[in-house]
Amino acid sequence: MNKKKRRLIMRTIILAVLALALVYTLYANFTKDSNQTIKKGDTAPDFALVDLDGNKHKLSDYKGQGIFLNFWATWCKPCEYEMPYMDNQYQHYKDQGVQILAVNVDESTLAVEKFVKRHNLTFPVAIDKGSQVLAAYGVDPLPTTFVIDKEGKVVDVLSGSLSEAAIQQHMESIKP
Amino acid sequence: MEKKQSKWALLAIWVTTIGFIAQIGYFITRWIASGHAPVSNLFEFTTFFGMMLVGAFIGIYYMYKTPVLGVFTLPVAILIIAYASMFPREISPLIPALQSDWLHIHVTTAAIGQSILAVSFAAGLIYLIKSVDQSKRSAKTFWLEAIMFFLICTVGFVLVSSGFKAMDYKAEFTWVDKSGQTAEMEYTMPALVGPHESKLETPDAFKPFFDLPPILSGRKANTVIWSLGAGIVLYGIYRLIFRKRAGALLQPLVKNVNLDLMDEISYRAVMIGFPVFTLGALIFAMIWAQIAWSRFWGWDPKEVWALVTWLFYAAFLHLRLSKGWQGEKSAWLAVIGFGIILFNLIVVNLVIKGLHSYA
Amino acid sequence: MNDIKCECGHVNPYGTILCEKCGRLLDETQKDSKLIDMRYEGGARRSQTYNKTIVDKIWNFFSSVKIGIWLIVLVLAASAIGTILPQEMYIPKTMTAAEYYEETYGWFGKLYYLLGFHNLYSSWWYLALIAFLGMSLTIASIDRIVPLYRSLTKQKVERHEGFMKRQRIFGVSETDQTDTQDLKQRLEKQRYKVREENGSLLAEKGRFARWGPYVNHLGLILFLLGGMLRFVPGMYVDEILWIREGETKAIPGTDGKYFLKNDEFILEVYDKDDKDFSEAIERTGTVAKNYQSNVTLYEKDGETLPGEEVNLKKIKDAQIKVNIPLKHDHYALYQMDYKKDELNTMSFDLINKKTEESFGSMTVDLNDPKPKYDLKEGYSVELESYFPDFEFDDKGTPITKSKIPDNPAFVFTMYTPDKPKGETSFVAIKQTLEPLGENTYKLAFAGIETRNAAGLAVRKDMTLWLLFIGGGIFMIGVIQGSYWNHRRIWIQRRNGQMWLAGHTNKNWHGLKRDIEQVIKGTDIEEPVDQAQDEPSSKKGEVLNG
């Protein structure tokens, strides 16, 4: 019966649309807590920051190199733990085309300078005055590290303190 | 269809109307005195609710000309107003969140909706008093009696509160709250139960029998116990004198009631009240919440209980329309619906804490 | 599964109870009932027509009102459970939710937390219940509105004998002298639409009330769709912006397009001597009158990368108060919170401890301190370490908990002509330590400056219009269905008698009053309410005295 078939098709379509809406809502609700602005696989948003020595670092200028982009604060203990490891690996990788850029979350220059001096950090450290870069990357919690390859793609987003081995492994992975 | 109203009924409705006009007078003068609609604290809101219950009754009375409805609605309204007057009655200033025209739009519409729904309770109650068989004990007689007992407890609360107020009874306590801080609490009734780790500061005041855990408010629990106690005493005295259930005592009063008409009034009141309630308690509420709190819905307990009320009456209407739940079943539902409204008015305001400022 | 042909010749769909056209009872099982069930006009509900495939079975499940009522009750119960204890969003942020519930509410709190009730309203099962309710609304409405529409548009004036007899309002008058034209006019005066066929009348009014439920369901469906839309990226922004007086900050959620400067935050309280309110203020304590942020809104001028210096173009000055948000370009800023008197600067005098002679004073900007402060010739102070929110850790070393200067502490070295190597001093609020031995000089506390901070909510909600339309349509539907009634009166001449039957979907009282007006003064007798077995006019007179 033709009429019956039409009705079955109509019903199937309506049910499918409703089911799709249900699944989408549940999925979106499920993932909403982890919706960092920048996720694995995204293109890293460009930015330009001036470091403590007065050098300007523009992300897009580093095309062709890997970037280990670390967000931190002086009052954050886990950030402090990984700093010496990052510095060790920086010595090893800086000539192999992997850069570290440590972005502080809008603290006073004095606090950051004292911190850098205390830990003898050699990689560039910049302060994100006004937290614009922080907002563009949707950083939460601290520390968060974005591992960016030579094409400017985010290969990994790491939150929490990293071991030296982990830092080494991630920097290796973005070696051009 | 001109109906003969008895002289007494005519007199009664006139007195009721005069009373209602006097209440409107209170509302207007208080509004002028405070500079804002007097619906901004628990006393003002509850009084308004009682006043609109009278108004809703008058409206429905002119549709159906049923004096018996007043015999039950008006005492309930009196109880509500008496209950309201047990709360602080002075004019209070508006906190910033309440400084909006939506205060009177949202709150009054919601209260009007609730009071129309309350008329459905009164009609349902009349239905039950007539239809429940009082010749033998049953679950129905028990629950009907429970409703009566609840009403008597409200009387008990009013009597006990005003009694101790007249005596100007006060007892100061220091106690330890749930975050471990020492705080002060003032009782206006002799403390049967004290707050957590309490120490009585007023000499000669009554010492509590025991202390409560810190999440319960000692003063409120004490008030509840006093009201229940007074209710039991009053009810006990009543049973000693009359020796039958309150439902049975009232039954002759409604012997001429047309059950079908009561059912229709109860249903009609829901039909009239439901849209008003939706508009006031949900739609206007959402508009205001969007303006004041930046989101139209925040799962605040008061909001949730407005939703619960709304869902309940939605279920009521569907049961009636599609499942044929009329008559007695429908009357029980009307009673439960009013129970939810009272829960939202009393328990949610006083026990469950939220953004609504009445606590 | 065959269509049913009625005696009157009309072909009805399978499952029809009353012929769509003449109203004859088609369902044999109901032949003995005194009254007929007029729900959906006795039409065939579509769901009952076919029940073969799995699709039909799912469809029928959601089409059932019984299931719909169960869903309402489940949502109701779940919502109520969520208010027993405060939801996670309302608990203090000082400890984890697991700890909070157990510590505050004991085993019950722990259980509540373990069952996930602390986040009930965003749990998958609560959302699924609401979604099922939405599906039930959609399918049940589609299933019912079509047959209802068919029956109401196809109905004939002249109805079958069995249909007439089984109406709740029914009466037979032993007369055939009645002037139907007169009746027709009387009905029209009562604002009925009257159709006439072969001397029979069908008077109808308020038919549009029958669409009310479907209109309100449509409104609810749109409202739920609006709620769903929130999950679509870009439709909804919900951020918090803390901004101190004097600060200019990018507004989060605007992709760096807008900036805000906080010019001033104002907190006003009611005067405790106010003649109207003094009594209430005395009882409850201070009552806030106004929370207000005076701000300037800027837009970024030109393309810059994040982190680069931006040029700002002023858009407007505004006052944000509770209930008066600042709105611009779909964004709205709400006054939500504030912090009074946050430390901003701290001043010290360098003095000789014995003589108390001062050698100059200095002011430290607590959000951007300088490394060195030059005082009088030959005197200077260096800031060795700064802890804006100071505490000692487990090992006794000073650390800072955050960058907010709530409890600042400093390590200063004071250089003076007689102590050229400097003296070190640890200075915190109400305490001074001299870790490297007794000093000659000290920095005496000379005052603070504070400023306020405003907590603003940043919102963009592109779903509001749909919610508004949904809510509006719902209200229209509910009013349409509640405040109007669909009333019908059938009048027929049969074998020298006048038959009258009446039906309404609700408010029988009103229908009876209409009929009474129509037949007043005619030969037609008052019909009987067959649900009550008594003349309808007795209704209403219920209490004698």
Image (cartoon, rainbow, N blue to C red):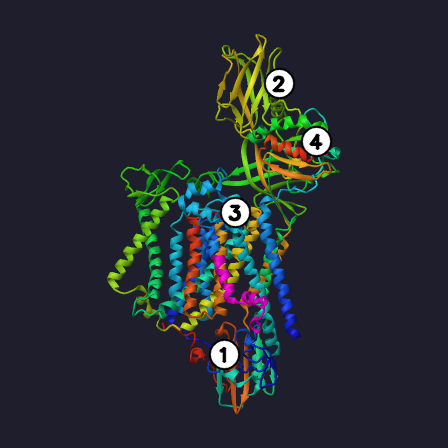
Instruction: Please identify the quadrant where the C terminus of chain C is shown.
Output: bottom left
Distance from the alpha carbon under mark 2 to that under mark 3: 50 Å
Check disc 4: other Cα within 10 Å, few if <14, some if 14-19, many if 20+. Answer: many
| Labels 4, 1: one chain | no
Residue B185 lies, in percent from the top left, at 37, 40
Label 4 with label 3: CB-CB less than 8 Å: no
Tag 2 residue:
C372
Query: Which numbered circle lies on residue A32?
Result: none
In the displayed structure, B63 sits above or below C416; it is: below
Q: Which residues are magenta?
A: C47-76
- Which callout, 2 or 4, points to the residue nearer the camera? 4
Residue type at mark 3 is: Leu
Depth check: A140 or C258 in front?
Answer: A140
Tag 1 residue:
C36
Q: Chain ID for label 4?
A: A
Instruction: Please identify the quadrant where the N terminus of chain C is shown.
Output: bottom right
Count every numbered label the image shows and give the total: 4
The residue sitting at the top extreme is: C418
Tag 4 residue:
A98
Residue A148 seen in the figure = yes
